[in-house]
Every structure is written in C-alpha cells, then in structure tokens.
Amino acid sequence: MTITDRRSLRAEQKRHERRDAILRAAERVFCARGYPDASIADVIDAAQISRGTFYLYFDSKDALYMELIERFTGLVTEALQVVDPQDPDPALRILENVQRVVEVALTHPELTQLVLRESRGLNQAIDERLDRLYDFLHSMVVGALVQGASFGLIRKVYEPVIATAVVGAFKEVFLHHLAHGHPRDRASMSQALFEFGMRGLIITPPDVT
Amino acid sequence: MTITDRRSLRAEQKRHERRDAILRAAERVFCARGYPDASIADVIDAAQISRGTFYLYFDSKDALYMELIERFTGLVTEALQVVDPQDPDPALRILENVQRVVEVALTHPELTQLVLRESRGLNQAIDERLDRLYDFLHSMVVGALVQGASFGLIRKVYEPVIATAVVGAFKEVFLHHLAHGHPRDRASMSQALFEFGMRGLIITPPDVT
Amino acid sequence: MTITDRRSLRAEQKRHERRDAILRAAERVFCARGYPDASIADVIDAAQISRGTFYLYFDSKDALYMELIERFTGLVTEALQVVDPQDPDPALRILENVQRVVEVALTHPELTQLVLRESRGLNQAIDERLDRLYDFLHSMVVGALVQGASFGLIRKVYEPVIATAVVGAFKEVFLHHLAHGHPRDRASMSQALFEFGMRGLIITPPDVT
Amino acid sequence: MTITDRRSLRAEQKRHERRDAILRAAERVFCARGYPDASIADVIDAAQISRGTFYLYFDSKDALYMELIERFTGLVTEALQVVDPQDPDPALRILENVQRVVEVALTHPELTQLVLRESRGLNQAIDERLDRLYDFLHSMVVGALVQGASFGLIRKVYEPVIATAVVGAFKEVFLHHLAHGHPRDRASMSQALFEFGMRGLIITPPDVT
DNA sequence: GATGAATGAGGATTCATTCAT
DNA sequence: CATGAATGAATCCTCATTCAT
C-alpha cells in the first residue's frame, strides 16, 4: 500500500464521516422544523460546517432530503423480509417483521418522523421516491395478507384498501408516539401494532409473547 | 326593503361568493403544490383575482390555510355523531359515522388531502388547531371503542394506541384513494374501512349491507 | 333666490364642512403617526368617510398634506405683520407678532407639529411650498433684525445666519412643548421666546476671536 | 502570524470597508430622499451591492438607520465636552465645543441633515435613541447655561425653554446651510452661532410685560 | 478541500388610487 | 354625490446556490 493510497483512504474515511455528520444534523433539523421550513443555514449550523462545504457533499437541499429518504427506505427494506411460503410459523415471521420496523422507528426517531411526514410537491424525484417506498410497504402488507389468507390465517379482505389502512395505522402510531416521546418499550409497541393489524384480521391469532 | 338593504344584501352575497371562490381556488392550489410551496401568486392566479383583492378577504396566507382547516374540521365534526348509549344498534350508528366521513372526503377531496397532509411548524395557531382536530378524532374513536367494549361488541384493547391506529388507517386510505383518484364508490369504501376498523375488533360482527 | 340656488348653497356649505372635517381628521392622524406613516385608511377612519369620498375632496394624499401646509402658512402669515418703520414702539410690535404666532401654535397644536416636522422629499410641490414658508419666516425675521438695528435696538449681526437660528429656536420650542403637552400659558411662552430672541444671554460678552 | 490570521485580517478589513461603503451610500440616499421614502433598492443601487449582500451587513432598514444615528450621536458626544468648573476661560471652552460641533456637521453634511430631520414614528428603538440624543444635547446646553449663570457670564433664564431654543437654533442653521450647500467657512459659522447663543441681540432691552 | 461573502429570484404584504354601482 | 371593492406596483426581507480565495 502506497502512501497515496493510505492518504486517500484516510481522506475517503474522513469524507464519509463528514457526509454522515451532515446527514445526522439534517435529520435533527428537518425533523424539528419540518423540511420546507428548515434552511440550509440551520443544517450547516447544526453540522458545524460552512455553507460551501455543504455543497461539496450534497448537490442541493432536495438531494439531502432524498438521501435521508433513501436511508430510511434502506432500513425499512432491510427490516421487512418476505415470508417463505414454506415457513412453519408465518405469523411469527410477520411479528418479527413488525418488531424490526419498530426497532428502526425507535432507533431513528427523527428520521422516521421526517420521512413519514412526507413533504411532497417540492421535487418530482422525491415524490417518486416516496411513492416507491409506499408501493414497497403496500406490497409487503398485501403479500402478508394474501399469504395469510392462503394459509387460512386471515379472512379474505379487499387487500388494496386494507393494506393502505395497515400502513396508515403504523405511520400514525409511529408519528404520534415518536412526537410525544412516549418511551413505550419496543415489545409492547410491536405487540399492540401486530395485534391491531393481525388480530382484527386473523382467524386464529398466534400465541405470541 | 329599502334600496340600500337590497344593495347591501347583493353586496354581502357577492362578497361571500368571492371569498368562497378564493377558498376553493386555495383548496386546489394548496392540495396540488402543498401549503408551504404554494405561493399567494398561485392562489390569486387560480382565483383570477389581483394581489390586493386577496388581502381584502384574508389577513394572510396562514389565515387562509387556517380557514380551510376550520372548514374541514367543521365538516368532520358534523359528520361524526356521538352514539347514544341507549341506541339499539350502535354498530350501525358507527357505520353511519364512517359513511358520513367518507362522504365528506369524497365531496371535498382536495380539502381533505390538504388537511390530512398536516403542514405543521409554520404557525402556532395552525398547529394547535390541527392538534384539536386530532384530539377530537381520537376521542371519538376512543369513545366508540369504550362503548363497543361495554356492549361486549369489541374486545378490550389499549385504546390510546388503537385509536391512533384507526385514525391513521382512515387518513391513509383517504389520502391514497383521493390522490390516485380511484373513483371507488362510497359504499364499498365505507364498508371496507368500517370492517377494517371494526371487524378486526368486534367479537360479533354486525350484519351490515 | 331660486330653489336651485338655495339647494346649491346648502350643498356648497355641506361640501365645505366635509372638506374641513377631513382636514381636521388628517391633522390629528398625520400628527400622531407622521405623514409618511399615516395611511389614507387612517384618515378616512378618523374622518368617518369612505375611501371614494376622500378622493372626491382631495386629489391625493400629497394634495391633502399640501393643503394642511397651506392652512398653517396662512395662519402664520396672518399672524406676522411687518412693523411700520414709523412705529413708536417697534419692540412691542415684535412681541405682539411673537404672541400671535404662539397663539397659532397653541390653537392648532397638531397642525403646527405636523408642518414643523417637515416631511420632505415626497413631492416637489410640497418641498417648494415648505421652502416658501421658511423663506417668508426668514424674511420676516431678517426684516425685524434690520429694522431693530436701524433703531439701534439690536446690535449688528450677520442676519442670514441669525434669522435661521431664530426660526429654528421657535420651531424647536414649539415642537418640544406641543409634543410633551406642557400646557405652559401663552404669555410666559411668548415672553421666553421673545427674550431669547431679543435679549440675549450674556451680561459681559467674552472677548473671542 | 499564520496565513489564516492574515487572511481573516484582510477579510475583516474588507468586511469593515464594505459595511462602511453601505453606510456612506445610505447617508447619501437617506439624506436625498428622506429615510421613509428611500428604499433598500435605492441604497443597494448607490452602494453597488446586491439585495442579499445588504442583509449580510445589516439586519434591516431600520437597523441601518439606527446605526447612522449612533454614528452621529457618537461624533457629537465626542465633540461636546463638559466644561470644568475651575476652567479660567469657560466661554472659550464653550466656543470650542461649538467649533467642534460645526466641524462635525460640515464634515458629515448628509449624516447631519439626515439625523437632524428626525424621521420618527417608524420604530420605537429609533425614537428612543433620538430622544436620548436630544436629552444629551439639552443637558449639555442646560449645563452651560447654569455654569454661565454661576460665573455671572449669563443672565438668569428659564433653562428648559432656552436650552430647547438653543438646540433648535443650531439644528436649523445646520440644516439650512447644509441643505443649501453654502460653503461658509467653519470659523465664521461657529462664531455666528456662538454669538447668537451667548451674546444676544438687543443692546437696550425693551420694557415688556 | 474548505470557506463564507455574494447573489438575485422569489416570498408575503401594504397602500394610494380608481371606478362600477 | 357617495361608496367600498378591486387593483397592482412597490416594499422589505429570505434563502438556496455559486465562486473567488
């Protein structure tokens, strides 16, 4: 490894850290003031960097917002795993999915609120990204509903509406609890959400802790 | 009736119409571009009035937004009626409430989307008004849950969370369906929402059409 | 006298009264808020007339201000009378002039403050009118100085500067006393001003270069 | 001295120069058009800067005006020095004060006119600042009068009125001479003002009631 | 790379004046 | 004559973005 390599490695790492610091600052700021009302000035103050530096790491305010959405999308996408049709306990798999999403929301409360609040109409790319996120969430829920029905666990519903309703229910509970800072423990929150979404729908509720 | 009376009556009416035209234009514009991003210029273009005229009817952009929120709140408040504990068929009363809310949402799709999107953080008065609206919705749902439980219609749930979830479910379904312009008929939409909210929770589902 | 004549006479009088009412309202409003900050809305509110009516009586806001300046100028012009070179007691004549000007200021405190505050730079015609007023005042004082010197009553001074100083002294005393509402009696105020202008302060003038 | 130091020093200096250039431009513009009528557009045109740059150096139009008032106040406060009661020639000290104030007015003609014109009623802080300036001037003159009387140099007068008159006399002379651009030499102007204030006009005071 | 001064389009709001009724 | 709704130019100010240092 040459000196240049080591140098550029260090530089690369530092660059990454800086980017991350900006993203974390933006999370806080955008969540606190709302994306449209938060200014670049707020972000650079929080991130302790100069105006120019910001544009060295991000193309625009919208690009920063977009990246935060991407981050959240990535976390949620990782958290939600398609249930194997062969799985012996699909309901448990679904509960685990809920638990992982709750984990994401409670670990990144500001990012979660920010994204769930959905500031739309600013930029087409952002709107499309949010659409894709919701399409994904929607399809995951629809998948669960269909699978649950096929297993005879869930009664037959009109999936498009019910999936939307389930997504909305989760969103609202997250937003409300994160905003009011109720430090509900993760387990009970997951349980309540799971039961709401599933119990209503499931014919034979699984025995979960 | 004197000439003056008749004149001022006509003037009063015209004034009211103008105000209404601005409100309707604002509904469209704020819904399409989002409140923070929509400018007064957009509104006056849509309403076909001059800059000055706008401020003849509204004190500020925020005041206009506030009035739209008030309008929506009024419609929803009228739509949701507390169920008499003596009522022989409380589930039907609740379904009627749902039907009336769906009616409001489908009759005023832009207003509904605009308000449900909740642009917050711009003005304290607005934030408080939205808080009050959600407190009201929340309390209505909690009321229904408690009552349903007392009748043995609904299983016991942790009402604060479940009420939040129900409100969120309705919000999301409205937002999604209004945004994508699915011209679903009111009856089936009401039914789906009602069943989602109730069926899940009710021990003995009512026989509704 | 025909009916038409009488009618038009009454109309004429009413018209005059209205005009006067507006002028008096404007005096109050312009004095209280300052000419540039006072709006036509303030004036018509104070005068209890409609927006349109205002423009029936005055061409513009500036024209109204101009008319108030004219009124003040008229009052002051009437108050200040050139002293006859033959007069046996010219100093008394000057004191009487002072007394009449004080009378004007105390009778029309708002008009006086308004005009003495000299909002300039708004309109060339107004600036010129104010210039003429000050030229007149200046020339009156210069006249008194010259005359006084010719009688041996006043020592020889460089009139242009001293006349300006005398005018300024009067202005400031009026402004100060009117603004702070010191209800000093007219006689003592006139006396103080007269003495200041005429008598001088030093008993033994120092020997300065 | 590090490079950063030198750089920030140069930056600091440039910043100061820019600020100063804006202040000087504002002096000109506010003097020419009057503070309320001059717009930020006028100032930035005169200063050859962009709209945004202006707000980089000043918080608001009022803040800029305030700073100009402060500048003038500072200059005048420095110019006027309390006369030591032990001073062998207090009249000379007073003449020196007058000379220094004249120097200020002639060196900063636009600033002087601007401030002496007293645009009030726009902003409470500004009004209070102007009040303080006049209180200071008033108290300086009162001090001189009282001291002069104690030395037997000045006859006993009713100080509050006479001090107001003296301040007004100076104001008017400055305003008049600066506005009309009479390039009177400083010495003779100081002399005339001093004599007016100190010496008085009449040789044989008339016997008035 | 890092900085922060500079930019100017765009925002909400005001207000003197006009004119149809 | 009287009215007051309508107008739109003009005002102050903000802020995302650029660029010379």
Image: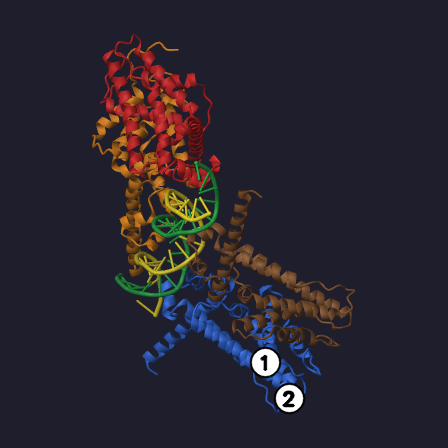
Chain colours: A blue, B brown, C red, D orange, E yellow, F green
Give the amino acid type for the residue marked by disc 2 in the picture: Ser
Residue shown at the point (74%, 69%) measured from the top left: B90
**Is the residue A157 above or below the residue B133 in the image?**
below
Chain letter for mark 2? A
Quarter the C terminus of chain D occupies: top left
**Is the residue A80 above or below the residue B40 in the image?**
below
Instruction: Report x, y in % for residue C160.
Output: 24, 24
Q: Disc 1 versus disc 2: distance between alpha carbons?
A: 14 Å
Left or right: where B177 falls relative to D109:
right
**Is the residue C199 above or below the residue C133 in the image?**
above
Instruction: Report x, y in % for residue C199.
Output: 32, 15
Residue A138, visible in the rendered structure: yes
Instruction: Report x, y in % for residue B123.
Output: 52, 56
Left or right: where D45 falls relative to A75:
left
Chain letter for mark 1? A
Q: Earlier in the sequence, mark 1 or mark 2?
A: 1
Residue D82, visible in the rendered structure: no
Q: Which mark is residue A141?
A: 1
Direction front: furthest residue:
C2
Give the amino acid type for the residue marked by disc 1 in the picture: Val
Q: Which mark is residue A150?
A: 2
Direction top: furthest residue:
C88
Left or right: where A22 falls relative to D52:
right
